[in-house]
Image (cartoon, helix red, strand yellow):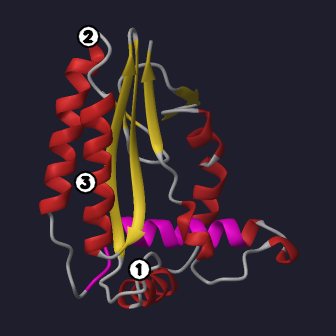
Amino acid sequence: MAKCAACGSTILFGGKRNGESRYCDAQCHDHAGLLAIAGKFPAELVRERALAIHRGACPDCGGRGPVDVRTGYRVWSALLLTSWRSLPHICCRSCGIKSQALDTLYSLLLGWWAFPWGLVVTPIQLGRNFAAMLRRPDPLAPSERLESCVRITLAVQASVPPARQPESKTAGISVAVAKSSTIR
């Protein structure tokens, strides 16, 4: 199976090509330019910013970290349509578990209602949520995923005119885009 050159998601069906690169959707294709800019930032700068976020207060609850990227997984279905998403969230572990529990409940209630994909994808997304809730982050170092979010945020800030940039240092960190897939 192919992997998206932008976000690393597995591409089951379709996608968008640009030369040798393949993207899961138009949004990731459009972000390819940002990735080129993001690759130019020094690793030391990215690591320093990621460590500051990792050791800082949770953006959701204001509690102690470590703060990192926690991903929840959702699925919903209706007759012949099934849509599933990965929802990255930058927060502390307890806020991440709450978010993943809500995504689990959402999927339990809305995931089963299409044949055949709702019945196939729902248990997968539920399992991914349970695995994510059990996973413990490294309390001493940020994940590669957080560093990637910082790198993309720096690229966004470098490509946006200064007058339009967010005021908060962590406001742009939510750039981690939720990935979704839909089958009809």
Question: Rounded to the nearest whole Å, what is the CA distance between mark 3 and mark 1?
Answer: 16 Å
The kind of residue tagged 1 is Cys
Q: Residue at image x 45%, y 66%?
A: 148
Q: At which x and y percent is residue 152?
A: 56, 65
Question: Rounded to the nearest whole Å, what is the CA distance between mark 1 and mark 2?
Answer: 39 Å
Q: At which x and y percent is residue 28?
A: 56, 42
Mark 3–mark 1 contact, CB under 8 Å?
no
Which SS class for mark 3?
helix
Q: Residue at image x 28%, y 32%?
A: 109
Q: Which residue is mark 1?
A: 61
Which SS class for mark 2?
loop
Q: Residue at image x 43%, y 86%?
A: 62
The question of residue 19 being in magenta is answered with: no
Q: Residue at image x 30%, y 28%?
A: 111
Give the crowd class for mark 3: few <14, some 14-19, many >=20 residues within 10 Å: some
Q: Which residue is mark 2?
A: 116
Q: Quadrant of the N terminus?
A: top left
The kind of residue tagged 2 is Pro
Q: How many marks?
A: 3
Left or right of 109, for residue 91: right
State which region is magenta.
141-157
Residue 134, quarter of the rendered image = bottom left
**Dominant SS type (magenta):** helix
Q: Which residue is mark 3?
A: 101
- Closest to the observer, 14 or 173: 173
